[in-house]
Amino acid sequence: MEHAIHVLATLLLLVGLHGMLTRRHLMRKLMAMNLLQVAVIVFFIALAAKSGAQPPITAVGDAAPRAHDYVNPLPHALMLTAIVVGVATNGVALALLIRIHRRYGTLDEPDVILGMRE
Amino acid sequence: MSAHLPVLMVVLPLAGAVVVPVVGLASARAARALALLALVLAHLCAVGALRVVLANGTWRYRLGGWAPPWGIEYVVDALAGGMAVLVSFVALLTALHARYSHEGRNPLNVATSHALHLLLAAGLLGIVVTGDAFNLYVFLEISALSAYALLAGGGARAEVAAFRYLLIGTVAASFYLLGIGYLYAATGTLNLADLAARLPQAPDAGVVGTGLALIVIGLAVKIALFPLHGWLPDAYAYAPAPTSAFVSSVMGKVGAYVVLRFLFFVFPAGGQAGRALDLLGLAAAAAIVAGSVMALAQRDLRRMLAYSSVAQTGYIMLGFGLGNAAALTGALLHVVNHAVMKACLFLSAGNLLARTGAAGVDECRGVGARLPVTMGAFGVAAVSMIGLPPAGGFFSKWYLVQGALERGAWIYVAAIVAGSALTAVYMFRVLEAAYFRPAAPSAASPPAEAANGPLFGPGEAPAGMLVPMLILALAALGLGVFNQALVDGVVAPALAGVAS
């Protein structure tokens, strides 16, 4: 069971990649890309976990906190940044999708490609 | 101020990107002046930092005074300094040219586009100077996001191409990030210098190897190494001229820089990194041939240039793959040469399109007489691209061939020579049409879209469009003439301790 979280991250990654390759609708491709990003986030957060450890907030007066009593806070901080990056990516992607939809009236990839040829 | 040059070269364009759109609300002209000022200052910082580094050795700058490996540090060595000078130079020249592709747009639109240009420059400079693997990821995404938005500015096809690039680029960045996660799991550090010290003692070679593979795959997509180049041609071909000039010339090179940084400076030599380099070398040889053949098959001038970038990236990665002193020197020289000549080629193709509406190779018939300056610059850059002396391109290929001969890698020699021959064919096809064919009668009626463009007209483009292109053409020649000085002054110190 210890590796269940890694199995989950791998599954999310594969589902994301599969969706990006096989879906025809551009919005679905974007959603699949999000799954892939979430997989990376889950992977990092799993790195931080320790069994029996507590959140990295030291008690007042604890002069010599021991690292192995606490969850590693660094991956969380990194993923906070990665989530912000992901939000920005989605913002740019959705803006592009709005432009594409206005121009072609559809987000279905084959129809968009047809529209580009005209 | 001079104690903070490494961080200033990133912060100035970044701050500019925030201020420029606000100023743009009042005046597009002021916004443009401010954007150019930020880039000039960033370039001066980069040049200043490089001078300091060449005189005193590697410069480690602690952000906020936090000591590494806990804090983020910026590390400028001769390699990073040289790249920073190159990136800021091309960023400045393409920004000068960008004024004209904004003609007839509303002021806020113009200011936003300048801001994105600054953001892209800040991201690329950040990648170059940072000494932290996660910080590098953030800058990678800053530059990528601004590139998607800028590339989408080229109209209908560009938007779809930019969206596809966004999907693929994000997957690539996620792979890089995942790879960093593996390295962090194996070593407990994200600082590149610290990683280099700890990786040889890492307990689990499997984890390190997986991290290496993920990083290399992610970067190979980012630099469009064959066969992972699928996103590139459409993204480059339909974008506004200064954007494709900027993105095609330095963005892929910065990716190549990261490959060099990881495989030669962070991972221990030989072993897993060696195997990765062997594979990259094979892919690079395939890229040179396949990219050149595909360039030859294109009828659209800018698509041809885009495929040529796939081939030229191959030359750089081939040098890395060979890994000896001569080959690495050639690869780094080619980073500089290709950046300068490809930016020049995209700017002249842009001028040509804006003035005459000619987008195809066939439509270039007779334009040599009509646009002597534009086609002259195109010719100089083309000669350098083919690799004829005295232009810079000759010397990078010369070093690469030497490196391949030293290794006895005849297949690689063949790939380099075949690539140059094919480059000669597809470049001369354009020059022949421009200079030796009479203008076709049908060319008198260009596509309505182009004829309505604000810059359409007889004769040469305005001086502001010509000057950046001419500076780049002169630089392409100068890089050849002063090649030895560049090798001794910057390339050799950049490779000190790496090339055996």
Image: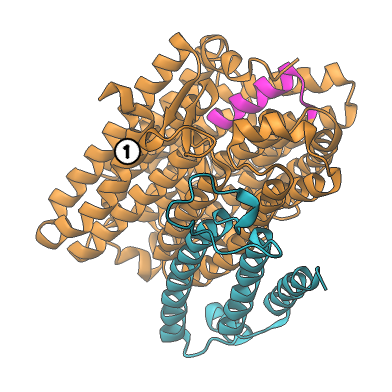
Along the line of sight, the residue nearer the viewer: A54 or A46: A54
Query: Compared to B274, does B169 lie above or below?
Result: below
Q: As drawn, is B233 to the left or to the right of B202? A: left
Which residue position is annotated with label 1?
B466
**Picture quarter with the C terminus of chain B:** top right
Q: Which residue lies most toward the bottom here?
A: A105
Q: Is residue B301 magenta?
A: no
Residue at 42% in and 20% down:
B50
Q: Colour of chain B?
A: orange
Chain identifier for the cyan-coloured part of the image:
A
Q: Which residues are magenta?
A: B322-337
Mark 1 falls within which chain?
B
Decide if residue B432 is in sight here: no
Residue at 77% in and 49% down:
B213
Along the line of sight, the residue nearer the viewer: B183 or B481: B183
Q: Amino acid at mark 1?
A: Leu
Residue count near mark 1 (Cα–Cα under 10 Å), binned few <14, some 14–19, many ≥20 = some
Residue at 42% in and 31% down:
B62
